[in-house]
Amino acid sequence: MQTALEKIQEHDLSAGLEIILEMVGYEPENITLINLLADCYYYLGEFDRAKACWEEVLRLNPANQEAKNKIGRYKTPSFQSWIKRYKHALYNIEQKNYEAALKSLRELLGENDGFVSVYQFLGLCYMACAEYDQAMIVWEKGLERDISNQTLSDYLHMIPDLDNKNNPVTDIEEPQAGKRIGWGKFPLQKAAFALAAAVCLLLLLKAGVMPKPESTLETQDTVQSEVAAHEAQAEIVAEDTPVLSDNVLMEGDNSRGGSDYDVEREKDYYQEGYQAYLDGNLGMAMSNLGVVVSMDTGDYLNREALYYLARTCYLQENYEEAEQYYLQYLEKFPESNYYDDSLFYLGVVYEATGQAEKAVQVLEEMQRVSPDCGYESSEFFKTIMKSK
């Protein structure tokens, strides 16, 4: 155990993990070991495994304060929002939308720079976009946090091979993310194997076997990366009030008649509306997002626009329209990342409009479909559920 602790303190998480896994094999109910195992998984970016370890500790000893504190922080709405955006970035990688994934991962790294897997996938996105120098920088930063990480070392060794035209593509192995410790049931492996094709493609491109990257790499210009909810949702929702821009609201398209607009401009309307939302220019946000929603294309941008339109109405305390758009979102996109968010804020809307019974119903539904979403820790949720 002392050796494992020294490895972890020396930023050698992979080596420490191997030692702890071997020890847990002999002492499967050693709480100290399981907590250490959770720490390794957590900082390697294997969040589901870390959570499972904390839950096992609490099963063995419900009073263990270390596990209670760490799983409590893990379940906070702010970190659950981060996790949700991280998983969506991996989904973008799987869909070969590397530019959107790269943008999301950079933002995520700026908020939490201690997770090795973020460096791993951000570097792969840079490589898929032919930004090899940036890929090297990111992977080297990742190795500073886990000095013996074999996956990151292998990736770094791939970059010099790009200049070796005699290196046959058949020698390139798929990224080995998760092979050693079995990520098979988690989204990391799917994302890594999706990127393997792009990496091999770049090797072919460099060797002159295939056309230039711009004519072969698949891009999805209509897809934008998800951005976090910008308020701390663990507090009472009444505190969630936006700070409006000091600028005069810009004139926007006020009609919601989406059929009157060129669907090809859906991306433009969405970008204008979403940026206005971030800037606190809620009038302009409603105008532009409303156009996208009215287009009713059912695609990613239409889905995002509908969520942020509902959010904008909520922030303006326009509860009647907020209710309408949240219900529409829940009906059209039940498998989306913002399903639990929409249920929660619909509950807030119902409570604000004197529909307490409906508020309880949607919060119970949220708890059923997404029991670990983090909203259960909010004061609003606790208050409503106590009064039912």
Image: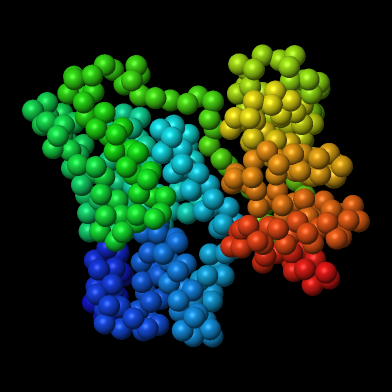
Q: Position of residue 279 (x, y in %)?
A: 69, 36
Q: Quadrant of residue 102?
A: top left
Tally of marks: 0
Q: Residue furthest left?
A: 166
Is 171 placed left or right of 251 in the picture? Answer: left
Q: Quadrant of residue 246?
A: top right
Q: Position of residue 195 (x, y in %)?
A: 33, 38
Is 14 placed left or right of 334 in the picture? Answer: left
Q: Position of residue 201 (x, y in %)?
A: 26, 28
Is 102 placed left or right of 215 in the picture? Answer: right
Q: Quick one: 293 or 2, which is closer to the camera?
A: 293
Q: Is any atom of residue 116 visible in this view?
A: no
Picture residue at 35% right of the left edge, 49% below the top? 189
Q: How is the image coloured?
A: rainbow
Q: Quick one: 256 or 157, which is closer to the camera?
A: 256
Picture residue at 61% right of the left edge, 58% below the top? 370
| Above or below, 299 relative to 149 | above
Is 321 placed left or right of 290 in the picture? Answer: right
Q: Position of residue 287 (x, y in %)?
A: 77, 27
